[in-house]
Amino acid sequence: MIIPIRTDSRLRNTPYMNWALIAVNVLVFCFFQHAVNTRGHWSLNMQAINPRITYRYELSPDFPAVKTFITYAFMHANVMHLAGNMLFLYIFGNNVNDKLGHLGYLAFYLAGGVAAGIAYVLMQSGGNPVIGASGAIAAVTGGYLVLFLRSSVTIFYMFWIFGTYDVPSIYLILFFFAKDLFLNFGQETGVAHVAHIGGTIFGFLICLTLLAVGLLPRDQFDLIAAIKQWNRRRQYRDMVSKGYNPFEYGSRQRPAVAPPPPDPRQEKIMALRASILDAIARHEVAKTPPLFLELIQLDPQQALPKQPQLDVANQLAGEQRYAEAAAAYETYLRVYPKAEHPEQIELMLGLIYGRYLSQPEPARRHLETALLHLHDQAAINLARDELAKLASADKPAL
């Protein structure tokens, strides 16, 4: 005897619809099939099934009513029949419910029962009427095979010994499918093996189609992912069989390549930058202007980190090296456009260009930009006064 206990596939959501289907099956069995009318009063008798209810809702292969393709799947012959079906539905249905969603799973389950019933009617003409959820549950296991191919199922086994063992889900599901297909098909065993086969094939094909067209989310555990991985391995084996050696290139002795000679210019640039930053760290900013001027002479695009760049520019302005200070401030604004208080740098550049370098156009441009963002009234007045001086200087003498 083999009984599945659990799977290792984790749930993302609570499978309420699967639990509801289990509850409906149990309720129908207890309060519908076993309810008997005694002297005008209904009571529950678990010793016998109500034949009038069973006859009305079972699926007969000779005279199938449309409604019975649904109702037969919610009826069971006895407690063991119900318990076995509900166990399999709980073990495999929870994950399929999680994957399909509640409404999708309900439609899939009911359609699986209908497909299993159609298979039974077509293949068992003249056979006995059938009841039970095993056809719909077979569709669930067929879907589980597609969606969770690489999962494992913990089973409880009892032969001459008993215990638990983890087996890949594909082996367990295919075992029961092969048992129906090859060992019991066409035999009178009291079990609707044709319904099991039809349900399994239906669930397998539907879920495979939903994955292939993208209506279900893909992951590395489903059947399509396994097929793609198998195909990559097959291509690799074919390449190796034709002489491809995957280790050939790594094993070749590569010729030694001499490293390129060091660039003296780059070494000098790195040394100057290190000297400037070291002097600033030791609060010796006064030593940085000649080093900085030598640096930008080697590479005019060089820029120091944000605060050191500003410190050197301020030092150059303090030493009245206005052209060099203006270039350092311009580099600061170019490299660090989102630095704090750029309007102060714009004001400083406007004053330098206007007062000391006699360049009214860049002075006016920087002062007007500064006015857009200045908040200190003294700084605003200073910028306006300087702009007024530049304007008066542009007027021709009378």
Image: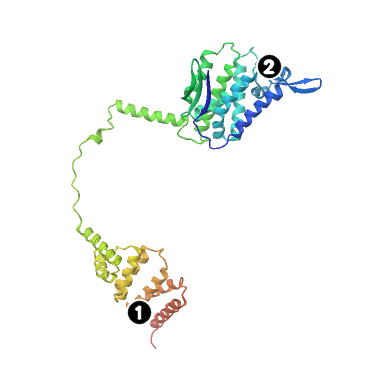
N-terminal of the pair, mark 2 or mark 1, is: 2
| Residue at the spot 23% in from the left edge and 58% down from the top edge | 266
Is residue 320 depicted above or below 249 in this figure? below
Tell which residue pokes out farthest to the bottom in this image: 398
Q: Tag on residue 196?
A: none
SS for dot 2: loop
Q: Quadrant location of the C terminus?
A: bottom left
Identify the residue shown where x is 68% and y is 16%: 63
- Residue receiving disc 1: 355
Report if residue 62 is visible in the image. Answer: yes
Please tell me which residue lies in front, 54 or 86: 86
| Residue 365 percent across, percent down from the top left | 40, 72
Instruction: Check disc 1: other Cα within 10 Å, few if <14, some if 14-19, many if 20+.
Output: some
Please state which of residues 247 and 115 is positioned toward the viewer in this rendering: 247
Looking at the rendered structure, the secondary structure element under dot 1 is: helix
**Relative to 358, residue 278 above or below:** above
Which quadrant of the view contains residue 229?
top left
Q: Is residue 50 above or below residue 262?
A: above
What residue sits 39% from the left and 81% below the top?
394
In the image, residue 119 sits, relative to residue 372, either above or below, namely above
Instruction: Name the residue carrying label 2.
Output: 63
Check disc 2 and give the amino acid type. Answer: Phe
Q: Where is residue 103 in the image (x, y as percent from the top left)?
A: 61, 34
